[in-house]
Image: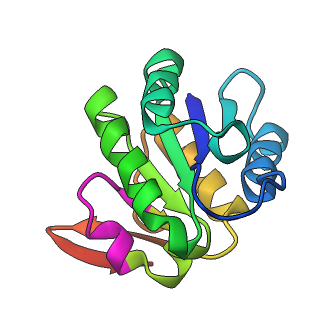
Amino acid sequence: MKILLDRPHSEVPSAAPPLGLLYLAAYLREHIPKGECTTVVCDARFKEYDFDTIEGIIRDEKPDLLGITSFSLENKEAHEIAKRSKKALPGVPVVIGGPYATSDYNQALGDQNIDISVIGEAETSFHQLVMALIRGEDWTGIRELAYRKNGAITKT
């Protein structure tokens, strides 16, 4: 499985490393058997990538899963990336995490372009989600996720 983790470019006045995404990538590297998963981190804020560039990266990388992190005040940018991801690769699941997904998963999942919200610290739950997807197993019982089920938002 190939995972693309993205931090959007926004007006947030910070270019500190995207530690949350780097923690996730390191955790997956540590806990998933070699060869089963590769992770690419796209820090669009540091690189000042516009949406067209990010969409091009999504097309070029062809991930099996896209993860987006977002602060609440940059949720518009996260939603635009999700929209462009679904345009570029319609069948690829989009997972959102970070402060926005944790504080307002209902709003995040109101966007049909976002499939799953990871709530809180994501290392364990995101790892479990990835492993379930790799194995083709049911992931709906994994703790600290929210998703739509029969049109209603469900939180585990």
Determine the residue positioned at 79% across, 48% down. 22
Q: Residue drawn 42% across and 45% down?
A: 81
Residue 126 in sight from this viewpoint? yes
Residue at 46 percent of width and 66 percent of height: 75
Q: Position of residue 118 (x, y in %)?
A: 53, 66
* 140 and 111: which is toward the camera: 111
Q: How many marks?
A: 0
What residue lies at 72% left-to-right and 64% top-to-bottom? 13
- Residue nearer the viewer, 117 or 155: 117
Vertical placement of residue 124 versus 152, above or below:
above
Is residue 52 or residue 40 the one in the foreground?
52
Dividing the picture into quadrants, the one containing residue 126 is: bottom right
Residue 31 appears left or right of 100: right
Taking the view exactly as shown, the residue that stands out farthest to the top is 60
> Farthest residue toward the left?
150
Instruction: Quadrant for the N terminus, please.
Output: top right
x and y percent of residue 8 in the render?
Answer: 57, 50
Q: What sort of colour scheme is used for the picture?
A: rainbow
Residue 113 belongs to magenta span: yes
Residue 151 in the magenta stretch? The answer is no
Q: Is residue 139 visible?
A: no
Question: Which segment is the magenta one?
Answer: 106-116
Residue 71 appears at what percent x and percent y? 59, 70
Q: Quadrant of residue 25?
A: top right
Which quarter shows the C terminus?
Answer: bottom left
Q: Position of residue 58 (x, y in %)?
A: 47, 27
